[in-house]
Amino acid sequence: MRIGIISDTHIPEACEHLPPPVFDALAGVDMVMHAGDVYVNRVLDELERIAPVVAAIGNGDEGLDGHRYRLEPDERARVAHLFEIGGVRIGLAHALPTPDETSQAVFEAAMDRHFGGPVDVLVMGHSHLEGVIRYGATLVVNPGSATLPGNLVDVPGTVAILEIGADGAVAAEIIRLDRV
């Protein structure tokens, strides 16, 4: 299974619509995960043209950033989602404290709170910084931002692809939108 991952789109503050390279980069995925700070529901509708969509609710989606946008209630959006795909537990949330910021114990407690225990793959956003890093048994995938990478404007953003093999093998790749 191929999962397209996007985060921190901040639409319409960052730009009016998703950049066209997002659709090229995520073409052919089986599912799209948006790791929060969507801002407006039409972004989920646009992504659903690619594949079924789920989203994490980010701090900006609740109006906590002081902007005028707020994600309306939507069955696709929750604070956290938990999936088991091919024997792989995947958690989706906007932001969890990772061991590079706190400790492994705090990270594990956050996974317990959000997902009822550890996950094999954690998909998250919030930082606008793309990366794929392993903390213990958990692979953390942050796609960065498709519209405000590193909180910069007029710079090509990033998304990610997560692949789950039939044997449970996991691979993740960051895709720069200027290379699509």
Image (cartoon, rainbow, N blue to C red):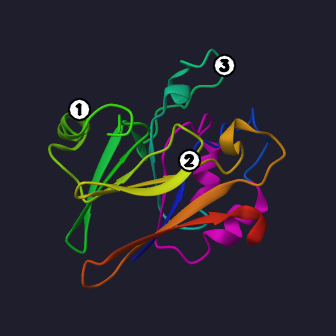
Sequence-earlier tag: 3 or 2? 2
Query: Is the residue marked by circle 1 packed among few (<14), some (14-19), or many (20+) residues within 10 Å?
Result: some
Residue 51 lies, in percent from the top left, at 52, 67
Residue at 42%, 36% in the rendered image: 95
Tell me the amino acid under the disc marked 3: His
- Label 1 with label 3: CB-CB less than 8 Å: no
Q: In the rendered image, which residue does mark 1 sit on?
A: 106
Residue 29 lies, in percent from the top left, at 52, 73
Q: Tell me where the magenta segment starts and ends, as one range.
A: 19-48
Q: In the rendered image, which residue does mark 3 sit on?
A: 67
> Which residue is nearer to you in this view: 99 or 16?
99
Q: In the rendered image, which residue does mark 2 sit on?
A: 7
State the CA–CA distance, disc 3 to disc 2. Answer: 18 Å
Residue 25 located left or right of residue 78:
right
Secondary element under disc 3, as helix, strand or loop, is loop
Secondary element under disc 2, as helix, strand or loop, is loop
Q: Quadrant of residue 109?
A: top left
Report the mark closest to the observer, 1 or 3. 1
Query: Is the residue marked by circle 3 packed among few (<14), some (14-19), or many (20+) residues within 10 Å?
Result: few
Depicted 74 relative to depicted 72: above or below: below
Report the mark closest to the observer, 3 or 2. 2
Sequence-earlier tag: 1 or 2? 2
Residue 112 located left or right of residue 17:
left
Quadrant holding the N terminus: bottom left
Query: Is the residue marked by circle 2 packed among few (<14), some (14-19), or many (20+) residues within 10 Å?
Result: many
Depicted 93 relative to depicted 63: above or below: below
Residue 166 lies, in percent from the top left, at 28, 85
Sequence-earlier tag: 1 or 3? 3
Tell me the amino acid under the disc marked 2: Ser
